[in-house]
Image (tube, rainbow, N blue to C red):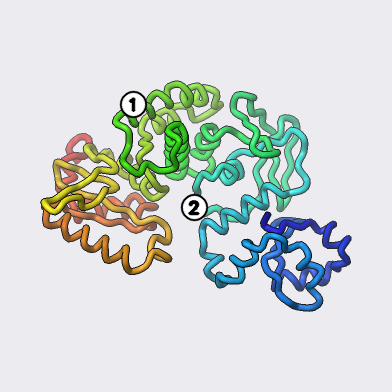
Amino acid sequence: MYNIVYYRELESAGVSTRLIRQAQECCLLKLCNGVYTVTLVCGIDSHRRIARFAEDTAWTDRHRATPPQELRNDYHYQELLRRLRILHYPRYRADDTFWGTSAAMLQNIPLLGIDAGPISVAHPRSSSKTREIHRSNRLIGRADRIRHLHLEVTTPVRTSLDLIHIRGQQAGFAAMETVLRQVLLTRYGATEPKFGYPPDFLRLARGELVDNWYPVIERLTTGQTTARRMCDALNPKSESIAESYCSFDLKALHIDGFDQQVKIYDDAGFVSRTDFVHRETMTILEVDGVGKYIKVGRELMNRESDQHNRLLALGYTVVRFRFKELLNLSVFATKLFSQAPELRKHVHGGG
């Protein structure tokens, strides 16, 4: 899949180093040193030997149909490239364990603002740094490792906890909520709850944290207090990284009373399922994820406009946050309290 090809294979097919460099401006994309993916069957005569490796037609069709600028701005596509790079890097050692951001990428734990920096692995006896890979001398116990395809990786729980220190508390919190949510949804055999959450969903989440998260926290060498505090604040009803960031901000501001994924009705019936609702102040928060309206079109925007007007008619104050506004707590707080000043009364200590 993905037309992965190694330098040695290109060389054996008679493709020169000079031609490989030229093809990277056309039909060949470099993932890391010595590893490439064939993105197009370009039709250039001198590239015919490269085209032999383009067996995944869905991959080449995608590149043919999508402008390069759109691919550069496509978060999921860029994540896939980073994942392919990790999977196919050719110079791992026998005792390498993927951890941190590299483990998160392999486990589809969403992170934003991750550059294409070195791959992160831990090794029990050695450390080294190159442009391609950072190997840290650290021992990760058997209980905190799993096998992912052909690679040794920290467990999703351990990965999310490590991200607190590596990426900061907000990013770590979002990763933790994602992992907790994935575990609970897998238990129910579904990817998303189409008909609402089970009534005992939060209770099950609490049991999962006690049974399977607290022991991992106890094995951390540093940051146990912070990890435990953040663990106790997790809500698996966050359905996107944006909602997790918003949830983190609300907790950082010590605001009581918000519930997530609440269905709102009026006389005409169902209005919407809101991201966050504060019933006492009749405040609703809606958060826009990254690139929400890029491909969904005008129909969804019109539907959300109708929902917004019906919520206002019910007496709700609706505050909508763009993703960038969630990244800065001061920006978030200023907008929140300016549009919903009644919430100040619900800050711990009276605000």
Q: Is 285 located above or below residue 74 in the figure?
A: above
The residue beneath circle 1 is 203
Q: Is 109 located above or below residue 311 in the figure?
A: above
Instruction: Out of 57 and 38, give the one closest to the viewer.
Output: 57
Q: Is 135 located above or below residue 335 in the figure?
A: above
Residue at the image position 57 percent from the left and 54 percent from the top: 79
Residue 260 visible to the viewer: yes
Q: Quadrant of the N terminus?
A: bottom right
Residue at the image position 47 percent from the left and 35 percent from the top: 186
Quadrant for residue 220, please give it: top right
**Amino acid carrying mark 1 in the image:** Arg
**Amino acid carrying mark 2 in the image:** Leu
Horizontal side of 163 relative to 236 (left or right) equals right
Quadrant for residue 108, please give it: top right
Judged from the image, the secondary structure of the residue bearing numbered disc 2 is loop
Quadrant for residue 138, please give it: top right
Residue 25 visible to the viewer: no
The residue beneath circle 2 is 112
Q: Quadrant of the C terminus?
A: top left
